[in-house]
Image (cartoon, rainbow, N blue to C red):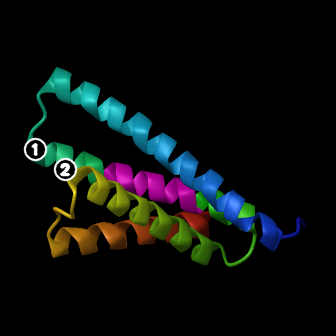
Amino acid sequence: MEKPVKRSTVPLTLLKILLLMYIITGVMLLILTLLLSKLQLTEGAVSVAVVAIYVLSGFVGGLAAGKRMKSRKFFWGMVMGGCYFVVLVLGSVLFHQGLEMDLTRFATTLVLCIASGMVGGMVG
């Protein structure tokens, strides 16, 4: 049985996993953009797809964190989902010069990111 990750390498490991999550997000958003231009998707369909991308990225990040950390997998999955959400919010604030999301959508996105990371961690 392998040992858990050393404490000194945890931040680097989390950053690598976060990068993986955003690579997945970028690829999936690119695919969504291509589908949007070809299929003339409705705004509702695009919103559902964006949420699905958040959930998929959170799940993969949680899965990777669970496999890498070896112990308290659900916790590390939640941490990855939370970090993913924080970067989303920071990006939104930087690009829009403020937070243009209503509280319900904000809270729903937070819960989905953390929950999908947790489930990924538990599976990992």
User: Quick one: 98 or 37, which is closer to the camera?
Assistant: 98
Residue 63 visible, this orientation? yes
**Residue 110 place in picture, x, y as percent:** 34, 71
Residue 5 visible, this orientation? no
Residue at screen point 88% across, 65% down: 2
- The single residue placed furthest to the top in the displayed view is 38
Q: Secondary structure at mark 1?
A: helix
Q: Residues within 10 Å of mark 1 (few under 14, many from 20)?
A: few
Q: Quadrant of the C terminus?
A: bottom right
**Residue 41 place in picture, x, y as percent:** 13, 34
Query: Circle 2 sits on which residue?
Result: 47
Q: Is residue 64 left or right of residue 45?
A: right
Q: CA distance from mark 1 to mark 2?
A: 6 Å
Which quadrant holds residue 35? top left
Q: Residues within 10 Å of mark 2 (few under 14, many from 20)?
A: few
Q: Which residues are magenta?
A: 52-62
Q: Amino acid at mark 1?
A: Glu
Q: Is residue 42 left or right of residue 91?
A: left
Q: Secondary structure at mark 2?
A: helix
Q: Is residue 59 magenta?
A: yes
User: Quick one: 89 or 48, which is closer to the camera?
Assistant: 89
With respect to residue 99, does 78 lie above or below?
Answer: below
**Residue 66 place in picture, x, y as percent:** 66, 65
Dots 1 and 2: beta carbons under 8 Å? yes
Q: Quadrant of the N terminus?
A: bottom right
Q: Amino acid at mark 2?
A: Ser
Q: Which mark is residue 43?
A: 1
User: Quick one: 120 or 110, which is closer to the camera?
Assistant: 110
With respect to residue 108, does 19 lie above or below?
Answer: above
Q: Is the magenta region chiefly helix, strand or loop?
A: helix
Q: Is residue 87 left or right of residue 3?
A: left
